Structure formats: structure tokens, C-alpha cells
Image: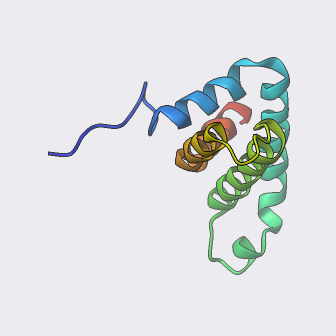
Amino acid sequence: MSEDTTYNGWKNYPTWAVNLWLGNEEVLYDRRCELAGMAIADANEDENVISKIWTVEQAQRYRLADDLKKWVVDELAPDLGATFAADLLGYALGEVDWHEIAAAAIEDVQ
């Protein structure tokens, strides 16, 4: 019997927590919406859409998931050096389902 690891309707606790912060802190929410808007606007020109590998919706979600992860990891997560806390933060961010957060952000913007 497998253990249910979902949390409040999200894939897991790290996904829920990141989405909560990105959705409830005004500055973070505004940036999340800005990134979602750019992903939506640019999706039609994505080479994977042009070559019919992805749908426009997939391109929107994949592009935004990558952008959100880069933003959170590179700009929002503190550089803790080589520490116990850094290892735990890195693990938690590695467990985030960025595509699930991207899909929710796109739905909010649309």
C-alpha cells in the first residue's frame, strides 16, 4: 500500500508551500503573474510548438515551470553555502512540482 504524500490538494508539501508564498505575497504574486504572462505570450513562437512536438498549452506550462524554478532557486532562495540548511532547502526545492505551480499560475492569469 503506497503512502499518500499529497498536501492540501497539491503534489506534496514543498509544492504547496512554494505555491502558497508565490500566491499570497503581493510582490511575489505580481512577479509570478508577469512570468506567466510572458510564457503565455511567447508560447506560440516556441520551437517545440512550431515543430509540433508540444501543444501551445504544453509550451506555456513548460516555459513557465522553468522560469519559476530559475527565479525561486536563483533569486529567492538564500545562498546558504555548504551547510545543513542548504542541503535541506535544496532537497525541498528539488521536490517541488514546478509544472503544477505553472499550471495554476497560467489558470490565474487567463
Q: Which color scheme did the rendering employ for the protein?
A: rainbow
Q: Position of residue 51 (x, y in %)?
A: 70, 81
- Could you tell whether 52 is left or right of 7 in the image? right
- Establish if 47 lies above or below 44: below
Residue that protrudes farthest toward the bottom in the picture: 51
Q: Quadrant of the N terminus?
A: top left
- The residue shown at (68%, 51%) is 65
In the foreground, 55 or 91: 91
Residue 33 x, y percent position in the rendering: 79, 34
Residue shown at 62%/59% (left/top)? 58
Point out the residue furthest to the front here: 83
Residue at (63, 69) in percent of width and height: 54
Q: Would you place residue 76 above or below residue 24 in this image?
A: below
In the rendering, at what x and y percent does residue 64 appear? 72, 50
Tally of numbered discs:
0
Identify the residue at horizontal 75%, vertical 40% (top origin).
80
Q: Is residue 51 left or right of residue 17?
A: right
Relative to 15, 49 lies left or right: right
Observer-nearest residue: 49 or 102?
Answer: 102
| Residue 60 occupies quadrant | bottom right
Residue farthest to the left?
1
Relative horizontal placement of residue 105, taking residue 42 as reference (left or right): left
Does 69 appear above or below 3? below
Quadrant where the C terminus sits is top right
